[in-house]
Structure formats: structure tokens, C-alpha cells
Amino acid sequence: MNSERKIIIAIDGYSSSGKSTMARRLASEIGYRYIDSGAMYRAVTLWAMRHGMVSRDGVPDVDAIVKALPQISIDFLVDGQSQLTVLNGEVVEPEIRTLEVSNCVSPVAAIPQVRHALVKMQQDMGKTKGIVMDGRDIGTVVFPDAEMKVFCDASAERRAERRYKELTEKGAGVTYEEVLDNVRTRDRIDETRSEGPLRCA
Ligand code: DC
């Protein structure tokens, strides 16, 4: 496809609403690059957790994380149909999807400086167009001029069922109630943060 005619497709929505599955399939179908922006927030969170910058109850040390941002590099490795998230040269794909990371990611993603750094990286990835990016603020903040914008939603219970199935299939010892609680907490934090809150473009 002629690169001049390529577009940016922004897919936003609530956690576990199926947007990543849809975005990945769409990108593969039309030969676009798929970028999971949530994986980038998860990677920063994992790095902060490993460096003792998130307390046991999920409260991030904002100053320490902001200071450390220049040391964190995030990339994606294309592996057949899927993309593997690379944090400072290490593939962290299974680790960033755990419930432990899910429980800490929204407060880290609410830090304005973290958002500024990742939004800039995401905008750079879109310079050549031909991408499908999914997240929370892609159509509102990252690419407000995206040619196509999609917003996904479903009830918290339905989304928790989906995430619970995914996690238990991977062998994680979690309960449905824990997953539902995580989904509801993340919805609340994602919708109410001052910077790039989750909303339909
Ligand atoms: O899509 P996900 O569940 O993997 O996203 C993980 C977290 O990252 C989610 O709780 C909110 C945050 N996020 C965000 O704030 N902005 C984005 N563009 C993508 C994700």
C-alpha cells in the first residue's frame, strides 16, 4: 500500500473490553503495525516495581519514577503474529500481564510525566502512519487527528470474566472477585485522572 495513503487507527476503551484482540487482528488483516500502548505503561510499572518504587499496596514513589524515566527504554519485537514488549533489552511479555502489575499500573499511568514521556514515544511511532494503536487516550491525546477512532466498552462483570479466563488459562492463581475488583479500580483511576483520562473521543 502506498505509504501516503496509510492512516492512523486509534482504538480506545475500558480494560479487557477486547480492544487489543480487535486491534491486533485488524492490523494483521490490513498489513499495519499494531502497538499496544497499555504494554508500555505496564513495562514502566514493572520496572518501578522491580526497583522498589511501588509500595506493597500499590502506591508509586512519584519522584523516584520521574527521575528514573530516562533510564527506561521500551520497544516491541515482532514475533510472527504477536508483538513482544521489550524493556531495556529484556522481553518482559509474560511478566507485564500478571495481576500484580495490573494492580499497580493505573497509579503509575496517572503520573503526568510518565504520560508525557510515553505519549511522545507513541507519537514518534505514528510518524510514518500505517499503525493501529490501542489504549485509553489514543484518539483524544496521542493522535487527536487520527483518521479512524474506535471506542470499546462492556460491563465490568463481562470484562472481568474475560480477563479471569485469560489469566487462569495461563495458570495464574486468581479469583474472579479479585479480577473484578481490579477492573473496577482501574476503571475509576483511568476515568478520573487529570492527564489523558479515559473518555470517548
Ligand atoms: O490496556 P491495558 O489494560 O493493558 O492497560 C494497562 C493500564 O495502562 C491501564 O490500567 C491504563 C493504562 N493505560 C493508559 O493510561 N493509557 C493508555 N494509552 C494505555 C493504557
Image (tube, rainbow, N blue to C red):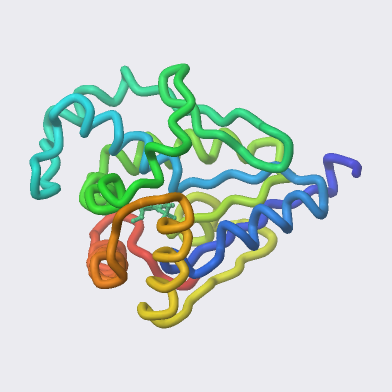
Q: Position of residue 109 (x, y in %)?
A: 29, 48
Q: Position of residue 134 (x, y in %)?
A: 54, 55
> Please, which residue is most extreme toward the right here?
1
Residue at horizontal 73 percent and vertical 58 percent from the top: 26
- Classify residue 101 as left or right of residue 9: left
Tally of numbered discs: 0
Vertical relation: 169 (above or below) 159: above
Q: Position of residue 117 (x, y in %)?
A: 37, 34
Q: Which one is nearer the viewer's eye here, 13 or 79?
A: 79
Vertical relation: 120 (above or below) 37: above
Q: Position of residue 104 (x, y in %)?
A: 23, 48
Q: Which one is nearer the viewer's eye here, 164 or 111?
A: 164
Quick one: quadrant of the N terminus?
top right
Vertical relation: 19 (above or below) 48: below
Vertical relation: 32 (above or below) 121: below
- Classify residue 164 as left or right of residue 143: left
Q: Quadrant of residue 148?
A: bottom right
Q: Quadrant of residue 25?
A: bottom right
- Classify residue 47 as left or right of residue 159: left
Residue at horizontal 43 percent and vertical 79 percent from the top: 158
- Classify residue 67 as left or right of residue 94: left
Q: Quadrant of residue 65?
A: top left
Residue at horizontal 29 percent and vertical 59 percent from the top: 174
Residue at horizontal 57 percent and vertical 61 percent from the top: 11
